[in-house]
Image (cartoon, coloured by chain):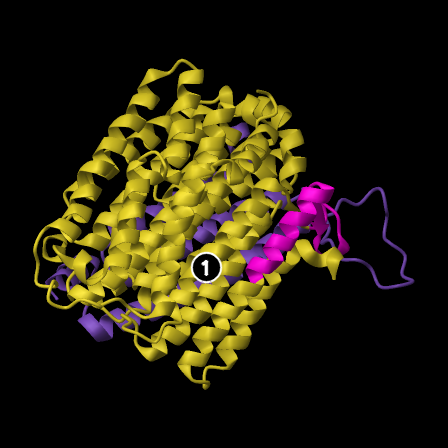
Amino acid sequence: MMAHLPILPVVWPLAAAFFLALLAAHNVGGLRRMAAGCAAVQLLLCTALFRVVGEQGPQTYHAGGWSPPFGIAVRADLLSTVMLMLVAGISLAVMVYAADPGDHDLSPSAQRWFVVLALILLGSMSGMVLSRDLFNLIVMIEITSIAAYGIVSIRDHPAALEASLKYLMLGAMGSGALLMATALVYATTGYLDMSLAGQQMITAAARYPQATMAALAMFLVGFGLKAGLMPFHSWLPDAHGSAATTSSALLSGLVVKVNAIGFLKVAYSVWGAALLARTPLPQVLMVFAILSMLVGGALAWGQTDLKRLLAYSTVGHMGYVFLGAALGSTNAFAGSLLHIVNHAVLKACLFLAAGLLTAKAGTRDIAKLSGIGRAMPWTAAAFGVAALGMVGVPGTNGFVSKWYIALGALDLGRAVPALAVLVSSLLNGVFYLPIVINAFLRPGPYERTPGGEAGLAALLPVVILAGVVVLMGLWPGLTLRYLLDAARTLLPAL
Amino acid sequence: MAERLIPNLNYLMAMVLFGVGLYIMLARSNLIKKVIGLNIMETAVFLFIIAVGYVHDGQPPINPQHGEAIPGVGQVAYTHPLPSALVLTGIVIAVSTSAYALSLITRIHRRLGTIDANELARRSRST
């Protein structure tokens, strides 16, 4: 059992998903609670794996007992186990929220599908984080993507259907690019295992400069499309804005993040930092990242729909993640990994809180939410804390990761990226703070209806996520020391 | 030029097909045609992967029956079996993506009465 621990975070949720799908005749409430239980077991498995990795170092597992280059390797190291715990933790929070019997924007039959799709997503995203084989990574990306298209379309609303189709078309183009890139890496290096292909990449890049460059460019386009990086982001506001609350929290919190992790894994373990520095990739990535941060923020500013605003803000914050990776210094890279964790917590909290607020208000129009903080003080306060985290106010976790990314830019003597972090943070302040001020200080129609908080199962995940925001802001070392170690192992040349 | 082009014609055609598929996906507004474009694009990648595994004059990589002599070990070249396995997996993924896309288009047609991307954008905004 213990020998198979590294593969269990993939097998368990997928098995649970298909088992729960067979139980479709069971009542929905029981199904939702069972799914939350499955996610809790997943979190325990990931924590156990994290402890094993902490005590015995990275664990490599060969699926079916076949070692690479014939078999598929799964590797649990510091980075992957931290990300596994993040994926499991956020999924657990979302599923506990989904288990609340209160107001839902999904019909009972759609809630069944949500439960099944969310568990499939949990397993396939864990697979993306763990896999060390390029083709296996593609398969896991495809499972994640199809489940993600589905989780948008289960909300029976014309906008959600159109968004799901748009997401599907652009996502499928991304998949095509990723598959072609994988084929090119296989053709030039002769391996699909990331470590083995990485050993051959230096000679391959010298012999086939165009083919390897095309592969790298296609990986950037493919993962960029799936992670919502700026020139490829057009599906994201529609999909994340029109999906159900719980779906949006999973998509914005996790799905775009694991694609960013996938890109970092491929770029830094197949090409490696030294080889990447000789390609135009860092410059191109930096332009895309800064574009995402500034234009994503500016577009979010113009939104009147709360969920679309949050979706555009995700585009902006994916910019931070890629900026840290493009800079390539240890501090910036650790900051970028930390921002993956922080933004997942923040955005899940914001989407879940926004779901409760808009359900109460009956509208997603930001201007009509004034005074709602008096009716729902806990929810609005959690939203406020997470909004401050997005701005990067000291004492919240968003500050720490932005600080490290800016520090990493200054380490390299580059002022423009550091300035972009600052300007983008100001932009975040300009559109997040008015919502919070509006909710608490302006009078509104909700003052006469106090005690309007949602049920405990829905409220608890929101408040706990807001607590985590402050906790990780005050004691950043909790996660940062592991991610600094992970950054050092991924960037051995520095 | 020609002597470099002819042996690499399969790779070239794969790239051309990839471009054709991508163009259809981007330029056509009929959703069914977009799905067809997607399939052309994926077929191009499969052609490319299969071409990578091709060995000139290679035998099919099939293990002989137990006890049977392996014909001419050392002289016979075998084509690479792994790309075929990859393509098989790739086809499964392509089929499931197409199936999902078509079922979604059916739902959109029932709900909004159109399979045109521009018309769909207009109708889903207005509701």
Instruction: Place residue A411 in its image quadrant.
Output: top left
Please give the residue where the numbered disc 1 appears in the rendered image: A91
Observer-nearest of A155 and A357: A357
Residue A180 seen in the current view = yes
Residue type, numbered disc 1: Ser
Judged left or right of residue A63, residue A410 is left
Which quadrant, please, contains the C terminus of chain A?
top right
Q: Image point 15% across, 63% down: which residue?
A: A363
Q: Indicate the chain on which mark 1 is placed.
A: A
Tell me, yes or no, if residue A73 can be seen here.
no
Q: Which residues are magenta?
A: A42-71
Q: Image quadrant for the N terminus of chain A?
A: bottom right
Q: Identify which residue, A299 or A306, lies in the foreground.
A: A306
Q: Which chain comes out yellow in the rendered image?
A: A
Colour applied to chain B: purple
Image height of A112 relative to A135, above or below? below
Percent position (x, y) of residue B72? 86, 48
Q: Residue at x 43, y 70 (%)?
A: A115
A69 is within the stretch colored magenta: yes
- Identify which residue, A397 or A191, lies in the foreground: A397
Residue at 31% x, 35% y: name it. Answer: A393
